[in-house]
Amino acid sequence: MSNVLDLTCDLIARNSVTPDDAGCQALIAARLEAAGFAIESLRFGAVDNLWATHGQGAPVLVLLGHTDVVPSGPVEAWTSDPFAPEIRDGVLYGRGAADMKSGVAAFVVAAERFVAAHPDHVGTLALLLTSDEEGDAIDGVRRVAKTFSARGTRIDWCITGEPSSTETLGDLLRVGRRGSLSGKLTVRGVQGHVAYPDKARNPIHDAAPALAELVARRWDDGYESFPPTSLQISNIAAGTGATNVIPGTATVHFNLRYTPLWDAPKLEAESAALLDRHGLDYAIDWHRSGEPFYTPEGPLRAAAREVLAAHLGRAPEESTGGGTSDARFIAPLGAQCIEIGPVNASIHQIDEQIRVADLEALPGLYQALIERLLPPA
């Protein structure tokens, strides 16, 4: 097997469900240390984080990834054991094959090749890996970014290896991500008998007009390549299960995905003002997953477009869609961030997979990017 295929299979074979790293980072650290990288392990709580650097000074280019995976789901539903990598008809199957042990392996191989060819390169090449991307993301890159901020660690450019491609490797270049803000709204009423509504107050009825206004509101018209900010209600719960009881409380979970025209404090204030106008007796708990980020035209975006166009034979789509990634914690440090990785069609699914040809092409794409950004001295 090729170097990158062998390493990907070795990583898949390690059952590293969040936050258990299962030895993935130790394996990678040993390889990178042998290649001349300085290794720092940053363990917070149950989470392992690896910071490996080669070279010194600016610019600082970071390859960002995660070694943890989501649970496999029912093993019997898989065609083969999710943690026993298997190749069938030119396709590699296993949990993490696309998200994102292939990207991590490709980073490692690209880094090894680059420093072997250019030991005296300009600036600093770094890898940052965590075992807490698929989970709560508290003690992973979020915590590492706080540590970096406190000690003045600089990052100029960040390439995240998340599976961003849609149909063909490299057909999409992620140049930003929307912010994510979740709210848990509890509306208080007065429980009572449905036959005596004058002696009760129904929190569902109270909340309904406010929720309708929240859902109908057009927050903005989008920004650059960002789609408009949107709010989605994901869960509503109330009542005892009895059909003759007016509930005493109603709970509503919702999420806002928002453009750089907003930040979390502004959205929280706007939402509270709307709820106040409706006279609700309520409490709301917020969870700030991350602010939006956007990488404008510059050396990083231009280099990525050039490398992907050479691979594809055409320019990639440049997008800010999708969910969130750990780059949301790196961007506030002042870094420009992009995402380039495998096809994402099977991520988090049964029989997760990557085409072997795509996997073997990936280190070359990353190495070409590194060479454009950190040329030989």
Image: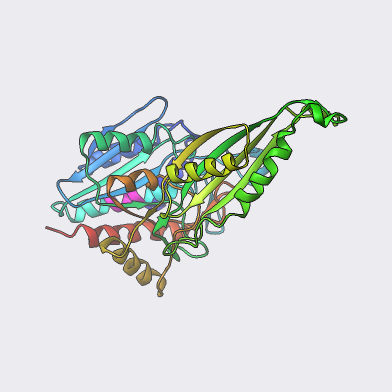
58 on left or right of 5: left
Across and down, in percent, residue 252 comes to: 64, 38
Vertical placement of residue 284 versus 181, above or below: above
Q: Quadrant of the C terminus?
A: bottom left
* Image quadrant in which you'd find residue 301: bottom left
Across and down, in percent, residue 81 comes to: 59, 41
Work out which residue is located at the far bottom of the displayed protein and give it.
313
53 on left or right of 362: left
User: Residue 179 lies in magenta, yes or no?
Assistant: no
The prevailing secondary structure element of the residues shown in magenta is helix
Across and down, in percent, residue 309 comes to: 37, 71
How many marks do you count on the picture?
0
Q: Residue at the location (40% across, 30% down)?
A: 47
Vertical placement of residue 50 versus 92, above or below: above
User: Residue 109 lies in magenta, yes or no?
Assistant: yes
Please report the bounds of the magenta region as a residue range: 107-111
Viewer-proximal residue, 46 or 242?
Answer: 242
167 on left or right of 246: left
* Image quadrant in which you'd find residue 78: top right
Across and down, in percent, residue 342 comes to: 46, 56
Viewer-proximal residue, 231 or 363?
Answer: 231
